[in-house]
Image (tube, rainbow, N blue to C red):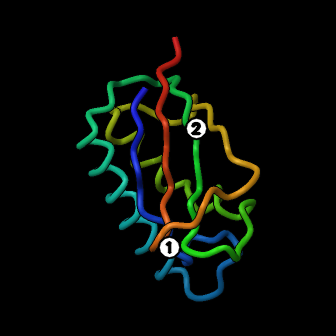
Amino acid sequence: MTTITFPWPPAALTPHAKGGRWGKVRATKRYRNDAFLLARAARIPRCPTARLVFTFHPPRRAGDPHNVPGRCKALIDGIADAMGCDDKHFRCAWPETFADPVRGGAVVVQVEALV
């Protein structure tokens, strides 16, 4: 099992975010690339059936933990890119509540290889 800490996803990636399409496109590309670089640095082995266990550490106590999974699609894609596989068979375990807030926010992902 590998644990990686990613930055908090940008507000532009919220599924109900207002604003133009291109802002979301740029934010998605940037967040996916950041996730790829962090996952590659963690040297995650290729495992198309990985289980991803998420822990959300928001930047402050306010917010809704049910909106964060939608913001994490680019993060999952970046992990899949680093593993060199498709994410369609990943099993994602989302938390029901936020963990303790941390400065700037963080998404901690435990990557478990499934056989």
Q: CA distance from mark 1 to mark 2?
A: 20 Å
Between 37 and 53, which is closer to the camera in this rendering? 53
For residue 20, side relative to residue 23 (left or right): right
User: What SS does tag 2 mark?
Assistant: strand
In the image, residue 33 above or below residue 16? above
Residue at the image point whose x is 75% and y is 60% from the top? 66
Between 22 and 113, which is closer to the camera in this rendering? 113
Which class describes the residues within 10 Å of circle 2: few (<14), some (14-19), or many (20+)? some
Is disc 1 in contact with disc 2, using a CB cutoff of under 8 Å? no
Tell me the tag on residue 53: 2
Between 85 and 11, which is closer to the camera in this rendering? 11
User: What SS does tag 1 mark?
Assistant: loop
Question: Seen from this angle, which residue lies furthest front?
Answer: 100
Spot occupied by residue 95 in the image (x, y as percentages of width and height) = 69, 47
- Quarter of the image holding residue 12? bottom right
Residue at the image point whose x is 49% and y is 49% from the top? 108
The residue at which mark 1 appears reads as 10
Mark 1 or mark 2: whose residue is earlier in sequence: 1
Query: Disc 1 residue type?
Result: Pro
Query: Disc 2 residue type?
Result: Val
- Quarter of the image holding residue 21? bottom right
